[in-house]
Amino acid sequence: MKLITRSLAGFLSALVVVLAITAVFHLTSWGKDAGPTIKVDTTALDRNPQLGNSYAPVVKKASPSVVNIYTTRVVHMRLRHNPFFDDPFFRQFFGNPPGGNDNREVTRREQFLGSGVIISPDGYIMTANHVVEGMDEIKVAIGDSDADLKYTAKVVGSDPPTDVAVLKINAKDLPAITLGDSSQLEVGDVVLAIGNPFGMGQSVTMGIISGLGRHYKEMSGYQNFIQTDAAINQGNSGGALVDASGRLIGINTWIASSSGGSEGVGFAVPINLAQHVMERLISSGKVTRGYLGIIPQDITPDLAGEFNLPVQNGALVSDVETNTPAQQAGIKSGDAIVEINGKKVPDANSLRLMVSDLAPGTKVAVKFIHDGHEKTVTVALAELPISTNQAGNDQNGGSGSGNPRTDALDGVTVADLDKQVRGQLNIPDYIQGVVVTDVDQDSNADEAGLRPNDVIVEINHHPVANADQAVDLCKQARGPRILLKIWEQLGGMGATRFLSVDNTREK
């Protein structure tokens, strides 16, 4: 076992908290099967700054709960026929190829590694979904030696949107970790990452919490990541992120890196979110989520002005799906949702998390701003459907086949939507507007976020039917900004959002 230590003010007294009050409870809400018994300690971390020169007691407490996961995937490949060997002249000199030239299918076994965390004494293990997804065989090794017994694990359930999976092995009296409370974390708290990087065996790295509530537009799913500079590398995925008391506060899942290795920007799924998913997976094998039926986006200062919003907090409704709870409650495109059940909505990602955490059928009070006035409605959430609007492989697409027109948005070229363009860009039939074929990189529209292959649906609240109408609407715009409603490909999905483009500056 390798332990990286570092002197740092503030954590000698934190070691005493290892023996703090531990709440042990049974998850009795899981139907007939009471589920695993897990330990949870929600005591606030002692942050009294004193000198600390070793985290060995913390590691000794938490590391026995971290396991190595070995996975195998069977790949079937067909040998390609090589016409080179059909010519008798070449076979005279080179003979027949090894194994013949008969398009035979061969089987190859690919092996991978990752980490996991024991969360109950009777064999429930939490890991990252991408560690076990699509694997034909999963083995779990407890301990830090190749000679340790490897258990065959089955997948209880997995949830790709949060990258959480739960495994079960046939074992008892395992060293289960104690779960912490990720809602109490603060930037600057010391954390330890425990896992099996590069198959070297269990290793520990130390760092701090660099950020909370991280999410990225380029990634799909439900994101509320803990960011840390504790080194996370290949093989660490699914391992433990623990606080200075040895409590599990996150499941390590991915890194941001230009080299493929750790550069001090790692991310973990907060344990509160992971535990919420785990409970649903164990009780029913799947995760059901509340569904409001809107497409939200963050509110920028420009958008706040365009929609007469008194504050920037909240989520702007860029579109409302038909026959959904939001539509039935009277929520419309352009409204701004500011509270759910009395809790403030900071931004669009927070709204997604708040709604998805609630069970389908839950009645919630939704406060929103419509035309400058606050309204509150009670909405019964539906169940989030599995999206069928998947984008194809060609997400870059191409130019429209119609007559491109350069409109009054300097540097933007648009074209009519036709059947060919819809097929190339996977644009649904219900989306009406004009496709953007080119955007100058030094234009106001580019600065606002407009990109090629976006579809302009509205200009200043007016629906757009064709390229000529788009040009006319832009020419008629006299205000300091032009409000666009666009449809775009986002993480393999299609979504609408608003953009506010400067209409005064010349680029």
Image (cartoon, grey):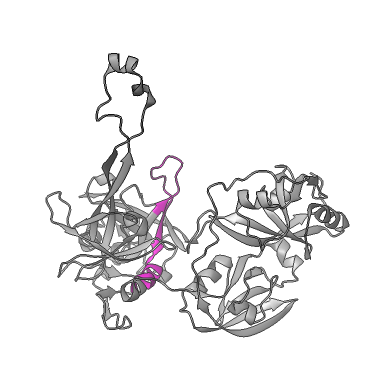
Q: Check the image and report above or below for 459 versus 332.
A: above
Q: Is residue 140 magenta?
A: no
Q: Is residue 269 magenta?
A: yes
Where does the magenta region start and end? 254-279
Residue 246 location (% of width, % of height): 28, 64
Q: Quadrant of residue 189?
A: bottom left
Q: Check the image and report above or below for 472 versus 320.
A: above
Residue 210 location (% of width, % of height): 45, 56
Q: Quadrant of residue 31?
A: bottom left
The quadrant in which the C terminus is found is top right
Residue shown at the point (31%, 70%) measured from the top left: 179
Residue that sits furthest to the front in the current view? 88
Residue shown at the point (68%, 74%) measured from the top left: 332
Q: Check the image and report above or below for 378 versus 502.
A: below
Q: Is residue 313 visible?
A: no
Residue 181 location (% of width, % of height): 37, 71
Q: Check the image and report above or below for 24 versus 258.
A: below
Residue 38 location (% of width, % of height): 26, 74
Question: Does 498 sit left or right of 227 as displayed?
Answer: right
User: Total marks drawn?
Assistant: 0
Foreground pick, 101 / 139: 101
